[in-house]
Image: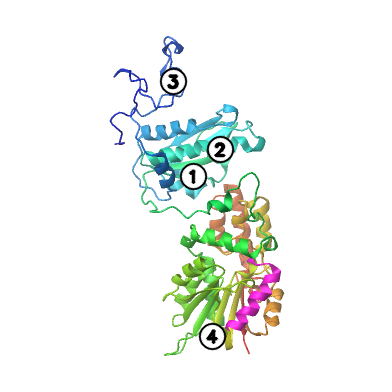
């Protein structure tokens, strides 16, 4: 039952009758003479008639600040009148030239939703999926069609919040034409997005932290420093990279889970290069450098119990988050080449690790970090560097993704998940040169995964059109036959690990 106030539609003139048609304040009353004799209810409705006779009230600011993106829904069906009220709120959004060239298909049939879920896993979670389409050749200039549909979706999201429903704005719909065909939309309708609706199974108690208004708002003329839109590390100033990664980690990436194929690569490297735990009674210290999300720090602490794990990051907030992921919790430190902060003690660590983070640094900054890692090592200590090799399949799969094989954007650049900004695979010779320049001696090498692993391919192609997904999976399967060739992993493995010793 939707809660409603005692008088949801007060007459601003103080008049009216009990038989008057309910209306929302601000929506003009229909003129009776404008309705033709014998007109059907659809013809008589000029868009002002709300599906619910009594509308619940909520303070605007409460609705705005309490709305959450819901990813887990209960299986309970949603009454159609509630869904219709959400749709009605949507059509009161502004649209380019007021064309209102949107069409909405609310799908509550479990079988249809199952087929939509096969196109994109994000459409497999809620009892209702609202497919939002717009006229294919209308308002294309400056993406006004996308802007119009987006305004409608935002209205629907806020309406769902007020009605006690949860919503999730889905942009990864898989093949939009397949979605269009599945719900029977004509060819001249373009599927922009889908809004999932349902009763929330879990609601985040707090919304993600936001970038401070002072960083994004300006008066009369832009006065900031923009976060780069490039995946090239050379385009990123170190402090901007720190700001970006801090925001991503604190705003949700900290919750991401490790990927099975990446965990397998790390464990194989530990077993090959650092196979033994500490001797009884020892308490060696291990420093994880630039862990960012702390996902791999957590795994390191689990695989090599007995070490005391500390972390060093660019910002204190990220360092504190990552240090807590080690068990027992480690000590967070802050260091950058230009602002040392509160660095770890030099010469104090038996092991220092840096896993898949040199790829996100400018070339000029990599040497400074590797040299500092060498200083943190005690004599005889070992440095473990993990990186993605530019000599592997990674490069051509990234080119395929960037051109047409996957979603665009800096956040989708292929790298060990979760992606946290710019990323450029490294030539093994460069890594070896950095270590040599820091005065370190080679102590071991390990490479693995000459071809994409089956579960990675399934994950990367989960929202691809069926034909493209099948093609990519077949090519990856054929490539995996090369993994058994002698020396293939050490020369062409995507994941490369190098172990160095401090004299």
Badge 1 crowding class, 10 Å Cα cut-off, few under 14, some 14 to 19, many 20 or more, is many
Secondary structure, mark 3, is loop
Q: In the rendered structure, are the residues bearing label 1 and label 2 in contact, judged by CB atoms less than 8 Å apart?
A: no
Asked which secondary structure carries label 4, the reply is loop
In this rendering, the label closer to the viewer, 1 or 2: 1
Upstream in the sequence, badge 2 or badge 4?
2
Q: Is residue 397 left or right of residue 40?
A: right
Q: Is residue 355 above or below residue 87?
A: below
Look at mark 2 in the image and give the residue it sits on. 191
Q: Read off the magenta span.
A: 360-376
Of label 3 and label 2, which has the lower sequence position? 3
Secondary structure that dominates the magenta span: helix
Quadrant where the N terminus lies?
top left
- Residue 123 locus on image (x, y percent): 47, 46
- Residue 45 image label: 3
Observer-side mark, 4 or 3, equals 4
Residue 402 horizontal/vertical position (percent): 66, 54
Q: Earlier in the sequence, mark 1 or mark 2?
A: 1
- Residue 414 pos. (x, y %): 61, 60
């Amino acid at each position: 039952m939707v809660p409603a106030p005692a008088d949801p539609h007060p007459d601003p003139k103080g008049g009216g009758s009990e038989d008057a048609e309910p209306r929302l304040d601000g929506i003009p009353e229909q003129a009776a003479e404008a309705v033709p004799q014998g007109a059907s209810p659809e013809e008589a409705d000029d868009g002002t008639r709300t599906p619910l006779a009594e509308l619940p009230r909520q303070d605007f600011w409460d609705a705005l600040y309490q709305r959450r993106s819901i990813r887990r829904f209960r299986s309970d069906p949603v009454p159609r009148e509630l869904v219709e009220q959400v749709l009605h709120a949507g059509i009161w959004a502004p649209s380019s030239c007021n064309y209102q060239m949107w069409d909405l298909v609310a799908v509550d049939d479990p079988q249809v939703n199952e087929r939509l879920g096969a196109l994109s896993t994000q459409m497999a979670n809620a009892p209702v999926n609202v497919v939002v389409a717009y006229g294919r050749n209308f308002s294309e200039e400056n993406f006004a069609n996308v802007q119009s549909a987006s305004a409608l979706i935002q209205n629907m999201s806020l309406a769902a919040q007020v009605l006690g429903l949860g919503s999730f704005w889905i942009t990864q719909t898989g093949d939009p034409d397949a979605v269009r065909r599945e719900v029977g939309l004509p060819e001249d309708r373009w599927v922009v997005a889908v809004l999932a609706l349902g009763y929330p199974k879990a609601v985040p108690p707090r919304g993600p932290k936001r970038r401070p208004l002072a960083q994004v708002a300006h008066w009369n003329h832009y006065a900031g420093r923009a976060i780069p839109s490039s995946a090239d590390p050379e385009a990123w100033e170190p402090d901007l990279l720190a700001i970006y990664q801090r925001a991503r980690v604190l705003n949700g990436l900290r919750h991401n889970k490790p990927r099975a194929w990446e965990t397998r690569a790390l464990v194989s490297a530990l077993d090959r290069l650092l196979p033994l735990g500490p001797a009884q009674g020892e308490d060696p210290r291990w420093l994880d450098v630039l862990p960012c999300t702390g996902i791999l720090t957590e795994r390191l602490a689990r695989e090599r119990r007995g070490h005391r794990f500390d972390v060093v990051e660019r910002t204190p907030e990220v360092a504190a988050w990552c240090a807590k992921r080690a068990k027992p919790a480690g000590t967070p430190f802050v260091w950058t080449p230009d602002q040392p902060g509160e660095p770890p003690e030099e010469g104090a660590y038996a092991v220092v690790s840096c896993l898949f983070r040199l790829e996100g640094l400018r070339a000029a900054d990599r040497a400074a970090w590797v040299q500092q890692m060498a200083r943190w090592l005690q004599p005889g200590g070992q440095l473990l560097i993990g990186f993605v090799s530019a000599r592997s399949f990674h490069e051509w799969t990234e080119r395929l993704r960037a051109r047409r094989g996957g979603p665009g954007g800096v956040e989708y650049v292929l790298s060990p998940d979760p992606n946290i900004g710019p990323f450029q695979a490294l030539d093994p010779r460069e890594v070896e040169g950095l270590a040599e320049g820091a005065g370190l001696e080679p102590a071991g090498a390990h490479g693995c995964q000459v071809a994409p692993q089956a579960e990675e391919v399934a994950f990367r192609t989960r929202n691809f059109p069926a034909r493209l997904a099948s093609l990519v999976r077949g090519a990856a399967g054929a490539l995996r036959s090369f993994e058994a060739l002698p020396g293939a992993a050490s020369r062409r493995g995507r994941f490369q690990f190098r172990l160095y010793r401090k004299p």
